[in-house]
Structure formats: structure tokens, C-alpha cells
Image (cartoon, grey):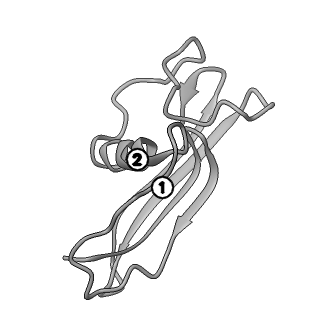
């Protein structure tokens, strides 16, 4: 199983991130950047995709995985991982209004 792409929308520091065209022959992928550039956020996205959410994400600190930079009270986020064989293995969409996930 080899990951071909990762897409994030409104997840942590990213309003939109697409890591695409990871070569199938790659044995190792490195994420390099300065402190605060979002390297850990990419790995947090994998955990969030795997576990999802079990309870509503309130605005009082519980929504730290979603992008804080939105001015609207309504938060929407999406994440997706695709494999080289064309399948989507993990995909989650969130719509949160008034502190409740829908």
C-alpha cells in the first residue's frame, strides 16, 4: 500500500494543502521545514483521519484540529488520502456549526 496523495482543507495551519504525485517507487518521504511550518500537522491529519471525532468539537479549544483562521462561526474541513491504485482509503468531511459537528 503506497500513498499517492494527501489533501487537507482547513486543518490546523492549512487552509488548503495538497501533497500530490508521491512517486510509487519511493521508499521514504521526508517532510522538511522550519519550526511551525506544519510538518507535525500533516501527521496529526493521519491520526485525525483514522480516529475521526467521537464528540462535538466546541469552539472553546476543542476544535484545535480545525483551522482557526476562518472568520466565520461555521467551520468546514476535509481530509483525504489516495493510494497509487486509485482507491481512496481515508476521507472525512466535517461541517461544524455552533459548536456541534454535523
- In the image, is residue 58 above or below residue 21? above
Q: Residue furthest front?
A: 34
Could you tell me which residue is drawn at 80 percent across and 31 percent down? Answer: 71
Toward which corner of the image does residue 87 lie, by quadrant? bottom left
* Direction from residue 86 to residue 76 in the image, left or right: right
Q: Residues within 10 Å of mark 2 (few under 14, many from 20)?
A: many
- In the image, is residue 63 above or below residue 90? above
Give the structural element (helix, strand or loop) at label 2. helix
- x%, y% of residue 89? 30, 67
- In the image, is residue 84 above or below residue 60? below
The residue that label 1 is drawn on is 79
- x%, y% of residue 80? 44, 62
How many numbered marks does the figure carry? 2
Tag 2 near tag 1, CB within 8 Å: yes
- x%, y% of residue 68? 66, 30
Q: Residue furthest right?
A: 71
The residue that label 2 is drawn on is 45
In this rendered view, identify the residue nearer to me: 98 or 61: 61
- In the image, is residue 88 above or below residue 69? below
Sequence order check, earlier mark of 2 and 1: 2
Toward which corner of the image does residue 26 lie, by quadrant? bottom left
Q: CA distance from mark 2 to mark 1?
A: 7 Å
Give the structural element (helix, strand or loop) at label 1. strand
Could you tell me which residue is drawn at 59 percent across and 40 percent down? Answer: 13
Could you tell me which residue is drawn at 54 percent across and 52 percent down? Answer: 78
- x%, y% of residue 40? 40, 42
Amino acid at each position: 500500500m503506497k500513498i499517492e496523495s494527501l489533501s487537507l482543507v482547513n486543518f490546523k495551519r492549512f487552509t488548503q494543502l495538497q501533497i500530490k504525485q508521491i512517486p510509487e517507487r519511493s521508499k521514504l518521504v521526508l517532510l522538511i521545514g522550519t519550526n511551525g511550518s506544519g510538518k507535525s500537522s500533516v501527521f496529526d491529519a493521519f491520526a485525525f483521519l483514522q480516529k475521526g471525532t467521537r464528540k462535538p468539537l466546541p469552539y472553546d479549544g476543542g476544535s484545535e484540529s480545525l483551522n482557526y483562521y476562518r472568520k466565520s462561526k461555521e467551520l468546514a474541513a476535509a481530509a483525504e488520502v489516495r493510494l497509487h491504485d486509485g482507491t481512496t482509503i481515508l476521507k472525512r468531511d466535517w461541517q461544524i456549526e455552533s459548536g456541534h459537528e454535523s
